Amino acid sequence: MVEERINNAEKTNRQTLPRWVVGLVFAVLIGFLVLIGLGLRRTQEGPIVIGQKVPYFELKTFDGEVYHTQQMQGKVIVVNFWASWCKPCEQEAFELEEAWQFYKPRGDVVFLGVDYVDTEPEAKAFIQQFGLTYPNGPDLRTRISQMFRIQGVPETYIIDREGRLAFVKKGPFLSVTEIRGAVDPLLP
Amino acid sequence: MLANIGFGVLVVSFITSLYGIIASIIGVRKNSLAWVESARKAMQITFPLITIVALAIILLLVTGQYQVQYVYNVTSSTMPLYLKITALWGGQSGSLVFWAWLMSAFTTAVTLRKWERDREFLPWVILVGLVTLTFFLSLILFFENPFVRFWVTAAGNQVISMFPPAGAAPLIPADGRGLNPLLRHPGMIIHPPMLYLGFVSFVIPYAFAVAALVTGRTDDRWIRITRRWTLVAWLFLSLGLVLGSRWAYDVLGWGGYWAWDPVENAAFMPWLTGTAFLHSVMIQEKRGLFKRWNMILIILTYALVIFGTFLTRSGVLSSVHSFAQSAIGPMFFGFIALSMIFSVWLLIWRWQILHAEGNMHSLLSREALFLLNNLLFMGILVVVFWGTVFPLISELFTGQKVTVGPAFYERSTGPLFAALLLLMGIAPLSAWGHSTVKTLGKALWKPALAALAVVIAAFAGGIRNGWALFGFLLVSLVIFITLFEYFRGVTARRRRTGEGWLAALFNLMARNRRRYGGYIIHLGVVLMALGIIGIEMFQTETQGTIPPGGSLRLGRYEVTFTRLDIFDANDGRNVARATVLVSKDGRMVGELHPRRDLYFDSMQPMTIPGVRSTIEDDLYVLLVDWQPISSTGVTFKVFHNPLINWLWIGGFVFILGMLVAAWPDKDPQPVPVAVRRGQAIPSRSSGD
């Protein structure tokens, strides 16, 4: 009886794989490879380049206000990535605030501070310490920094009135003059 | 000079392994022993060659040749000697060389064994080993050359290249950038090599599986040969994972040990399939079942090993472990694609002849329970895999990388882990071939009663968390069953031989090391589970800013801040070290020194907790922040981690069990239960 069972088992076991199973296996495999391949291509693509349209994004500040870049069309947007743990960020904080105070009355220049991978109490202390008055908010899930593919903090991206990336600064600004030198040519 | 020698030898080793591939293919096609022997020699020569390459890099690191870009990137003059040596795996190109070196050591060791009975496997094993090795060598040679240097051209431009452009002079930086401070920890020195060893040694069972598929030898010979390799691979991978979590606990300063980070998952996934494989090969050996399944498992394990290496090195997923974004991503992608498609095709081609030699008779037999164990492991794998690649899927469809948090993993794998624990208790009690509820129940009721007593005691002790109580039930059940199994084995042996308790225990284990080593591993796992239940379900924390003399309370503990010292250490860091007094139930129990080190060269801070460890719990104090002019005081974060040390104790027991199970022996293996038909090879074998 055992012999018979084994024979039966062999009969069922000796089958080749049905075509649809083979097809499915390869489909899953190829699907997985395509997924990884696309992810890889994105990684290799690198940051948004100068002259390219910058996709719209939203920043919710520490005070709970929401800023959407779609509502800032026609304005020059200065996007500064920083963090409270970042030493060089302290170096440019006063300069950024001073530049903001200079442009604020004009109304066609916006500053956005994007706080990268940070803890809220420390970040708020940083804002207070340097007296920053332009909108600052956390980059939740690092969405904005991934969009710009920043490599570290501080980095600053300036978007012109047509919504195109016009200027990139990696590392801290050294003076207000440097910031004005980047923003002024974009204004009418 | 040294860099040139290193580079030259690297080129030679690449050519040698390329030659070995060609020779083994010719050997198979012409059925020529001479060609296969030549391929084997080529394989064996790669080891001394790559050893020279690795030594050249180490010498460059130790002597501080900052003109070499790799040396400049990973070392600095203030680093101690042992860190300069271990900087070999501190960066992308060096660690690739290290990988290739281990790989050639292992494959060479395999080719040194006696091959009389398995000659048809040899060319294929060499081929798989060498193709993998050649791939890594080509990455090093063409994309991540560790020997490239800085030059200044006549025009004054800085150039990075292997050989100087015409008229260029060497550019020698005064000092290097130094190793990432997070990696300057003893755990970090051993953790990567352990993982690499685990990864690399899984290539060997895969190579044999491919050889078995290609040659059509469907008996369990390939499994018997590679059994010990699999155990060794598994040992190293497990060690790497445990050391990695210990490092995270000690250094990263967030009070945890495992974060479900993509790269942690990358090492955990081959561990899951490897563990499933370790269990299911036993069924093929004993009962001739699951041949196809074992092939699938080992192919998956190999694919996941390569995939894990790819994840760490391509920058596809962001992680604390990532190396800098690199050009080797597409190469890796191509290799993964080719090896997976080839393996799957091979498996489908041979599907028919990989039929089982028997049938499963009982749902409670050990093989059925092992199958269940395998399915649970696969379930966990699917969850972890889905969570790991989810950011890629979400990016594809929504344009945003959405990362799933630890909660996702914990909730979805928790029940599966609990079921695995339960199986771990029951499966060893069941018999091969056939078991019934009655036989199982008979073996189970005593340990189950004892476990229930533990839970009642825990409930009486004030624990009201239902999940935790259930966890304790499972943990104590497995512990009692395992101890009971030992007790049964020892008493039976004593009755038969009249030996003393210790002698009986020792001989029992010596006679069946795989089984009793396995039990010790199980004990280790449940002890680790105890630690995990403790920290996951009972961890408490508090944070507060306190002036000198002030204190923070957490449960029965009180932490009093006494002083803060800030000073420069002579190895290039500024240290802020707090002194806190710890009292428990009002009684002073000790002093802790949480601190924050700031490394000057990289301006990177590192938070080192002050930890008071006991069997019962850890009090884990972090220095979070302080005001320069100490008026308001210092901010501390305090964690209470109950039972956490059982995680590390369990880790030790686990490793001990593995050593028992994997220790080489000369004893013949027991004859399998089912006698194979139509098989020329004797089933008694020594393995290796």
Image (spheres, coloured by chain):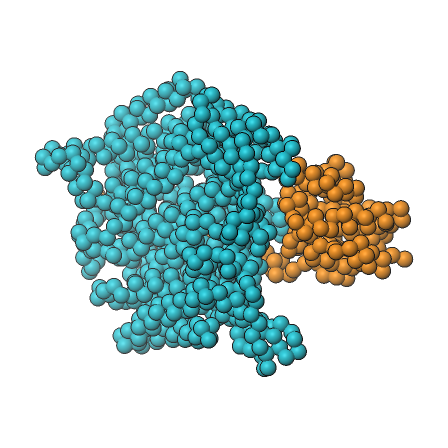
Chain colours: A orange, B cyan
Near-viewer residue (B571 or B21): B571
Q: Residue at x 9, y 35 (%)?
A: B498
- Quadrant assignment, res B530: top left
Against B111, is A26 above or below? Answer: above
Residue A24 versus residue B531: which sits nearer the camera?
B531
Please indicate, yes or no, whether residue A26 appears anywhere in the rendered image. no
At a point 31% along the width and 73% down the height, the residue shown is B41
Horizontal and vertical percent position of residue B223: 29, 55
Left/right placement of residue B194 relative to residue A172 reads left
Q: Where, quadrant-wise, is the C terminus of chain B in this rendering? A: bottom left
Q: Residue at x 60, y 34 (%)?
A: B634
The structure residue drawn at horizontal position 44% and vertical position 22%, both measured from the top left corner, is B587
* The one of A30 and B54 positioned closer to us in this rendering: B54
**Residue B9 point in image, percent of width and height:** 41, 74
| Residue B547 falls left or right of residue B356 | right
In the shown orientation, is residue B682 left or right of residue B469?
Answer: left
Residue B576 appears in the picture as rendered: yes
- Relative to A129, is B86 above or below? below
Q: Position of residue B265 (x, y in %)?
A: 48, 47
Outermost residue, top side: B460
Q: Nearer the viewer, residue B232 or B577?
A: B577
- Return the x and y of residue B609 as percentages of the image width and height: 50, 39
